[in-house]
Image: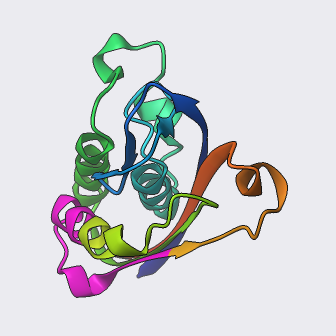
Amino acid sequence: MNRVGFGFDLHPLVAGRRLILGGVTVASERGLGGHSDADVLSHAVAEALLGALALGDLGRHFPDPDPRYRGVSSLVLLRHVVELVTARGGSLVNVDATVLAQAPRLVPYLPEMAKRLADALGLDATHVSVKAKSPEGLGLLGREEGIAAMAVVSVEVA
């Protein structure tokens, strides 16, 4: 049986942090605020995987108050989510993800983001699509107050 999951994440841009998206450090004066490394792209993919098997959300599995997850790489969390899906008979088929950011320009980083996500997910890079879209100056994303990401995954369940 094929299951589909949708994930979304949004974090504020803050001074004093590196900007990590899809496990890639992106050149930027600000990074994303959050308990872990705040990688919205990895979080959106993980949320989609959890949703595909009705396993709750990231906060349920990796609560903010837990000091074990402070500053942790979101790729580590994503690998754990893949283990949860696999333990329930799921096999990831593909990922389609989009990052919404006014700045910085992400096009040069997209292939490496797809590669790092694919590695964390145990997929061939041809099964992971990562795109970037500008909010065209609209709303909090257009004002460069934050960055968001969304993802759709397909999971085959035995």
Vertical arrangement, residue 99 with respect to residue 29, above or below: below
Q: Position of residue 80 (x, y in %)?
A: 25, 44
**Residue sticking out furthest to the front:** 29
Please name the colour scheme applied to the rendered image.
rainbow
Q: Quadrant of residue 6?
A: bottom right
Residue 8 seen: no
Vertical arrangement, residue 40 with respect to residue 157, above or below: above
Q: Quadrant of residue 113?
A: bottom left
Q: Position of residue 73 (x, y in %)?
A: 27, 37
In the displayed structure image, the side of residue 142 where residue 5 appears, left or right: left
Q: Quadrant of residue 137?
A: bottom right
Residue 27 vs residue 80, the one in the foreground: 27
The N terminus sits in image quarter: bottom left
**Residue sticking out furthest to the bottom:** 126
The C terminus sits in image quarter: bottom left
Residue 118 covered by magenta stretch: yes
Look at 22% across and 51% down and name the residue there.
83
Segment tinted magenta in the rendering: 115-131
Look at 47% across and 40% down and name the residue there.
29
Look at 60% across and 60% down and name the residue there.
101
In the displayed structure image, the side of residue 64 where residue 129 appears, left or right: left
Q: Position of residue 40 (x, y in %)?
A: 49, 49
